[in-house]
Image: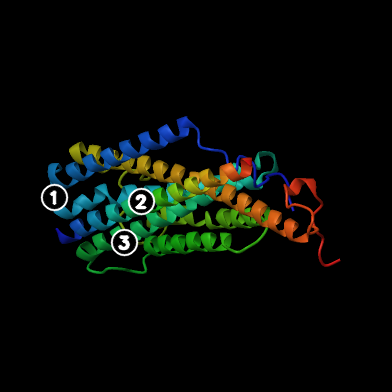
Amino acid sequence: MRYIDAGYVVGLTVVAAYAVVLLGRRRRLERTRRAAQPEAGA
Amino acid sequence: MTAHASTSEAGAAPAGRGFTRALRVLGVLGIVGMGFTVWLGLWVTPPDRTQGDLVRLVYLHPPIAWISLYLAFGIAALSSVLWLWPRTRSRFWDRLAVSAMEVGVVFTALTLFTGSLWGRPTWGVWWAWDARLTATALLLVLQLGYLALRRVPSDPDVRARRAALAAVIAAVDVPIVHFSVNWWRTLHQNATVLNANLSPTIHGAMAWTLLLGFVAMTLVFFWLLLLRYRIEVLAEGAGDAALQVALAERWSEGAPADEPAGPASNREPARSGS
């Protein structure tokens, strides 16, 4: 069973970690865009 | 240089409400679907007659491979063709190609990892230079090569064309991976679902759980793809904004001391080196 457990744990953790990285990148870029908007409008 | 697709084309446009909602729905459905797949795969479905409990990896490994080989690479290759075709050329296809390729890398690496975990107890080895395994490893190298190529600094259109050509050439490996089990004698078993007779060799609860695994993993993939696409749009917008700031600073440096550094659009840029 350890091979099965390792497959599920690592597989799903890697996908989840990648999703978290993408969400973090998107949040950072959204924040940068919002911060740049008032400057562009000025 | 082809000037069909400007960098600013929808570059910094905020995501629509529909896009955000679709992203959220896909994410929730994908996670719930994966939860059900894990529950059914590990606790509900019966063990296999020959493989015993090891068969439970079938609900994970083939869905991941399906994403990596057919969906991610298929989308990346098709988007690249549509970018290269002058009539359909748009920055959208370039963004979609790079997004699909990056998500695909994660899934190809997981395909190799979960396959190796399955191979150890069934074949007795972690790895074999078998046709299917080798062609899949080559696919991962090609995907990483594509992403490396995109990091070479150049004009956005030149970079997009170079990357699109690389994706189309790399796509030759996809049918090789798929048919490798038929063309050569390999350790890897033949396709369970998409076999030559289109007659699945899996039935009942196991078949339904496998189907759910495919659907859930596909939803997760599209969630990640849209998320990655949004990042590409935002990054392009941030790049444009940074360029505008740098140009404004450069122009203000070249302006006379008594002239206030106003909007750059009112002045001619300082031409250096002439």
Q: Position of residue B155 (x, y in %)?
A: 68, 57
User: Who comes first in sequence, dot 1 or dot 3?
Assistant: 1
Name the residue at the top extreme. B18
Q: Which numbered circle lies on residue B130?
A: none
Q: Nearer the viewer, mark 2 or mark 1?
A: 2
Please say if the residues under marks 3 and 2 sit with CB atoms less than 8 Å apart: no
Tell me the chain of label 1. B
Three-letter amino acid code at the position of disc 3: Phe
Task: Say few, some or many: other residues with alpha carbon within 10 Å of mark 2 (under 14 / 14 to 19 / 20 or more).
Answer: few
Please say if the residues under marks 2 and 1 sit with CB atoms less than 8 Å apart: no
Q: Position of residue B171 (x, y in %)?
A: 52, 54
Q: Nearer the viewer, residue B270 or B70?
A: B270
Q: Residue at x 70, y 43 (%)?
A: B86
Residue A40, located in which quarter of the rendered image?
top right
Is residue B64 at least partly visible in the picture? yes
Kind of element beneath mark 2: helix
Q: Which numbered circle lies on residue B113?
A: 3
Figure quadrant of the N terminus of chain A: bottom left
Q: Position of residue B257 (x, y in %)?
A: 78, 59
- In this figure, which residue is indicated by the disc labeled 1? B49
Q: Position of residue B139 (x, y in %)?
A: 46, 60
- In this figure, which residue is indicated by the disc labeled 2? A20
Residues flagged by tags 3 and 2 on a common chain:
no
Residue B271, located in which quarter of the rendered image?
bottom right
Kind of element beneath mark 1: loop
Relative to B231, residue B36 above or below: above
Three-letter amino acid code at the position of disc 1: Arg
Tell me the chain of label 3. B
Is residue B82 at least partly visible in the picture? no
Task: Say few, some or many: other residues with alpha carbon within 10 Å of mark 3 (under 14 / 14 to 19 / 20 or more).
Answer: some
